[in-house]
Image: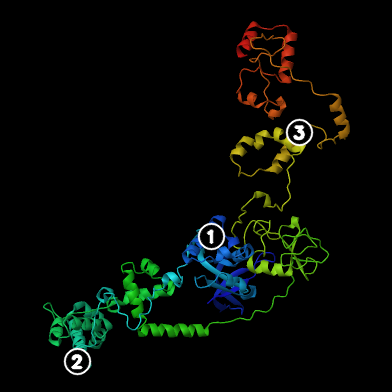
């Protein structure tokens, strides 16, 4: 069936979708539901979404159904909200968290995708999501319905038309009902075949262990495999009774025919029943985890024979009795508590229904002023709101009726970085739509803190702490030590004098009256450079550990040394050094030579 439920998650996020496996009554009288989890597209990563879309395109090509391509963009957008992903994850939830019923079915080829949009609270799934491994797999429970699973039926022949096909190549005849033997003679031969099978089990050592009594051996010899062998033998001998009886007892002894039901031991049968209880009809998992020494064909054949036994009938009755005693339904009263996202009518929004501004039609076509109730939605700083109809759609289907600029309607109101299932949200597309809801801040170091870093350097050991960032710092001890080591005087810094800043207009007038002087042109190649006007390059440099902008702006070629032919324009700091050297009156010849060589 497609039974599903909506589960309450939070006031702002969409409802979660679950499927009830069983209802249990707790010791205190409350009802708990054991449910299977379904995930929406918005709950899984972008990589897996692309994989799911690729699978959908391949499925559409196999079906040769252009229905999806013919749908308008609005319906394609809404159809994505109806797709779910099944998981093997089970959870228990109080029945009071259930908010309604929905229908979740496995997608098959015979059903049109558009039909899900026409039905309220209807969803489909075709892939299984593993939240731990973060993988998507095709559902093993796929119902093989559709064109590729149907036989090609030939046209009906006319009355006088002859069949030109060679029937011997199409089929093999294994029994002729129009033989010379009567029905009584055939029944007598089958009794002889069962008698030979019972005698063969008496002679076989392993059969005496499995079938210790005579009537059990006779029952095993009466199974279908013995009768099939007898009919095949009769047809192979040309329905000659004498030859057929002789074939039942060849030279080596009587023929013993066994099927899977007889070949399996009692312990193997118990293992199979335990595996069937755990995995259902997933015979591949049964073979891998419980019966690796059996072939898959053997397990499947045993299953269909096991269904004909009394053991299967007894288990079916026990399960029916257990299901009868279990809780089948629970009454869920209407949830009438007010939603915290409800807005009063005098709130003016920035966006209505994710798209339009106030006073214009919303997504549903209802004018923004005519909805009986509004709900806040999206990041709080954007002040979006939804009408009652769009809010109901958002809660049920996890999206809006039309695409919006809010990156797939992911950020709900007061939403953190996790989805309802604890998964990180993906923000695909342009990063400009990833709206920050928290306000920016900065940490400002006080004067006392900077003084404590210098006075208590031996206690703080900043280099050691930088290499061990997880060690705690005893700030109380540092404060106390700083108070002892600090010089006498006021412990609090003196208040700063207010600085009067000139208005912008006076600054602009000053810059206009004092324009920047033009840069000197490049010197001709080979010209001599005087040490009185330029500072030698190899003299003691002024180290600059701060920002590179202190030395003034430099061109790209000066940064990278690409153009060595141009003379270097010295920064003002170097001019100061050159003036000091010229005033000292000790220009050295070696320095002049070095400058000439560098130029």
Q: Report how far apart the C-alphas of labels 1 and 2 lie in the structure.
A: 65 Å
Q: Are marks 1 and 3 in contact (CB under 8 Å)?
A: no
In space, the residues marked 1 and 3 are separated at their CA atoms by 68 Å
Residue 185: image tag: 2
**Which of the pair 179/297 is nearer the observer?**
179
In this rendering, position of residue 446 left or right of residue 143: right
Query: Picture coordinates of residue 333 (x, y %)?
Result: 67, 79
Identify which residue is drawn at 71% across, 33% down: 455
**What is the secondary structure assignment of the residue under circle 2?**
helix
Q: Report which residue position mark 1 lands on.
A: 53
Residue named by callout 3: 486
Query: As displayed, is residue 94 above or below residue 240?
Result: above
What is the x, y in percent for residue 185? 19, 92
Q: Is residue 570 left or right of residue 57?
A: right
Q: Residue at x 82, y 37 (%)?
A: 492
For residue 465, above or below residue 380 = above
- Where is the C terminus found, in terms of image quarters? top right
Which quarter of the picture shows residue 188?
Answer: bottom left
Query: Going from the N terminus, do you reach mark 1 or mark 3 first?
Result: 1
Among numbered discs 1 and 2, the one appearing first in the sequence: 1
Q: Looking at the image, is mark 2 or mark 3 earlier in the sequence?
A: 2
Q: What label does residue 79 carry, if any?
A: none
Label 1 sits on a secondary structure element that is helix
Secondary-structure class at tag 3: loop
What is the C-alpha distance between the residues marked 2 and 3? 122 Å
Camera sees residue 175? yes
Q: Are marks 2 and 3 in contact (CB under 8 Å)?
A: no
Q: Residue furthest front?
A: 160
Q: Residue at x 65, y 49 (%)?
A: 431
Q: Is residue 363 shown left or right of residue 498?
A: left
- Answer above or below: position of 365 versus 548: below
């Amino acid at each position: 069936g497609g039974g599903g439920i909506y589960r309450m998650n939070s006031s702002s996020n969409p409802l979660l979708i679950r499927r009830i496996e069983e209802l249990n009554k707790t010791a205190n009288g409350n009802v708990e539901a054991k449910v299977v989890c379904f995930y929406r597209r918005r709950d899984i990563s972008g990589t897996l979404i692309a994989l799911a879309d690729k699978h959908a395109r391949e499925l559409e090509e196999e079906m040769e159904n252009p229905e999806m391509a013919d749908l308008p963009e609005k319906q394609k957008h809404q159809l994505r909200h109806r797709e779910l992903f099944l998981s093997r994850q089970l959870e228990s939830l109080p029945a009071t968290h259930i908010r309604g019923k929905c229908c979740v079915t496995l997608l098959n080829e015979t059903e049109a995708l558009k039909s899900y949009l026409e039905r309220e609270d209807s969803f489909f799934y075709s892939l299984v999501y593993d939240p731990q491994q973060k993988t998507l797999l095709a559902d093993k429970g796929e119902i093989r319905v559709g064109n590729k699973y149907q036989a090609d039926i030939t046209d009906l022949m006319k009355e006088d038309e002859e069949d030109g096909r060679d029937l011997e190549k199409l089929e093999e005849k294994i029994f002729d009902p129009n033989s010379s033997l009567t029905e009584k003679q055939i029944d007598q031969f089958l009794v002889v075949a069962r008698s030979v099978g019972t005698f063969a089990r008496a002679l076989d050592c392993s059969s005496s262990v499995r079938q210790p009594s005579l009537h059990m051996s006779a029952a095993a010899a009466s199974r279908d495999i013995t009768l099939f062998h007898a009919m095949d033998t009769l047809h192979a001998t040309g329905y000659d009774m004498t030859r057929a009886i002789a074939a039942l007892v060849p030279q080596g002894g009587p023929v013993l025919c066994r099927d899977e039901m007889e070949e399996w031991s009692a312990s193997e049968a118990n293992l199979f029943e335990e595996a069937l209880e755990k995995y259902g009809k997933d015979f591949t998992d049964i073979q891998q985890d419980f019966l690796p020494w059996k072939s898959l064909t053997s397990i499947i054949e045993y299953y269909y024979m096991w269904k004909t036994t009394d053991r299967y009938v007894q288990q079916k009755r026990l399960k029916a009795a257990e299901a009868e005693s279990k809780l089948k339904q629970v009454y869920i009263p209407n949830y009438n508590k007010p939603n915290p996202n409800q807005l009063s009518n005098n709130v003016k929004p920035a966006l209505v229904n994710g798209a339009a501004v106030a006073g214009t039609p919303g997504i549903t076509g209802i004018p923004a002023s005519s909805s009986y109730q509004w709900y806040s939605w999206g990041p709080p700083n954007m002040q979006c709101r939804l009408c009652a109809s769009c809010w109901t759609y958002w809660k049920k289907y996890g999206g809006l009726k039309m695409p919006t600029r809010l990156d797939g309607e992911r950020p709900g109101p007061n939403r953190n970085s996790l989805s309802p299932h604890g998964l990180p949200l993906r923000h695909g597309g342009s990063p400009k739509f990833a709206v920050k809801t928290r306000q920016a801040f900065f940490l400002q170091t006080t004067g006392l803190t900077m003084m404590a870093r210098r006075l208590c350097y031996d206690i703080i050991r900043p280099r050691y702490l930088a290499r061990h960032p997880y060690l705690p710092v005893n700030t109380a001890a540092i404060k106390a030590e700083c108070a002892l080591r600090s010089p006498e005087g006021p412990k609090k810094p003196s208040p700063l004098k207010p600085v009067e800043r000139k208005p912008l207009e006076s600054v602009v007038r000053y810059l206009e009256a004092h324009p920047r002087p033009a840069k000197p042109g490049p010197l001709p190649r080979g010209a001599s450079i005087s040490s009185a006007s330029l500072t030698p390059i190899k003299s003691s440099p002024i180290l600059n550990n701060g920002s590179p902008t202190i030395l003034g702006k430099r061109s790209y070629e000066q940064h990278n040394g690409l153009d060595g032919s141009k003379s270097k324009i010295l920064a003002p700091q170097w001019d100061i050094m050159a003036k000091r050297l010229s005033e000292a009156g000790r220009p050295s010849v070696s320095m002049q030579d070095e400058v000439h060589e560098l130029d």
